[in-house]
Image (spheres, rainbow, N blue to C red):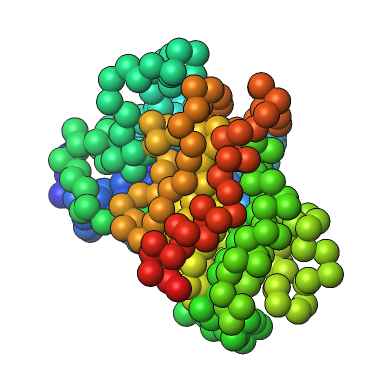
Amino acid sequence: MSDEPEHIAVIRFSSLGDIVTTGPAVRALKARFPDSNLVYVTTTPYNDLAAALPGVDEVVALRRRGEGFREDAARLVEMGPRSRVADLQGSSRSAKLVKLLDAHQVVTEKPPRLRRTLLLATRIRFGDFLAVPDRMVGRLAEWGVQGDDGSLQLDIPDEVTSEVERRWGDRVRGAVVLVTGAKHETKRWPDTYWRELLDLLPPDKPVVVLGGKGEFPASFAGLAGERVLDLTGATGILQAAALLKLASLVISGDTGPMHLAVAAGTPLVAMYGPTVREFGFYPYKHDRSVVLERKLVCRPCSAHGSARCPLGHHKCMREITPRMVSDAAADLNLW
């Protein structure tokens, strides 16, 4: 290798939580090659999120599919050769992009799919399962990369935080944030439990519901605008991260915003149903978090959640009661 600065590409196309959990690997890579130009390659919905990862110098956001993806990939190639590529996506699409980049050195990180499949099929743990950030850092060890023992982190621009303060101010500062939705139905807590939980929260605490459009609980009908601030579908990713940083507590299932809460350093109560620690996505090195889960022979039933409980009872989430969540928050000395 020459003495010229390294030109490094890190590839992770999606999704929200997955990109946040690449942060420790990106920091470690930048620490190993501090004079490098580190480009993070993702897809357009996550452009700002990738840019907020410490260690990233530049972001190239590709359109997700078809001709747009191919055109954007071609522009990336035109930026010049990469001395190293860290493929943290590990998919057939990212492999094609790696080939186009023609890097001198390539590291590809792939999940332990066989052991995960065996775990789902037999409930038997074969070998050690690492947290995803540790797995990524470990894969980069052949380049002399070492982790820094830190948690997830984001550099949220001051203007984003200022905008959140300006728009919502005291409604979000010190609030309890409820992340009520999830991409897959089996990761969602029963709707009526959120209403029961609301009655157990300190009455002087502002409450914010955060998530995608349509994720405001039906059981909260008539409450929006009074005690509860409905911000579902109202924030971008970094706005959500800034809001979580201002909050006093986050209550969430196994979702992308949960990882944002970890990166924000906010106390967290997380509810895990169909998924388990071995999949690698528990709150990472966050000492002010409590994970609630039930010991059931049917767990795990899915690596990412599914549309319905295979057994029809959904006990993994139904047996986590509102009182258990409230008590977990109390254990964090929040009230």
Residue at point 83%, 64% (across, down): 221
Compared to residue 220, the image places residue 76 above or below, namely above
Q: Quadrant of residue 152?
A: bottom left
Q: Is residue 143 left or right of residue 198?
A: left
Q: In which quadrant will I find the N terminus?
A: top left
Q: Can the viewer see residue 29?
A: yes
Horizontal and vertical percent for residue 167? 66, 83
Q: Is residue 306 left or right of residue 108?
A: right
Choose between 155 and 119: the one closer to the eye: 119
Residue at point 49%, 13% (across, down): 121
Q: Residue furthest right?
A: 222
Q: How many marks?
A: 0
Horizontal and vertical percent for residue 294? 49, 36
Q: Can the viewer see residue 160?
A: no
Compared to residue 33, the image places residue 67 above or below, namely above
Horizontal and vertical percent for residue 165? 57, 83
Q: Quadrant of residue 319?
A: top right
Residue at point 26%, 56% (across, down): 150
Residue at point 67%, 53% (across, down): 193
Horizontal and vertical percent for residue 122? 45, 13
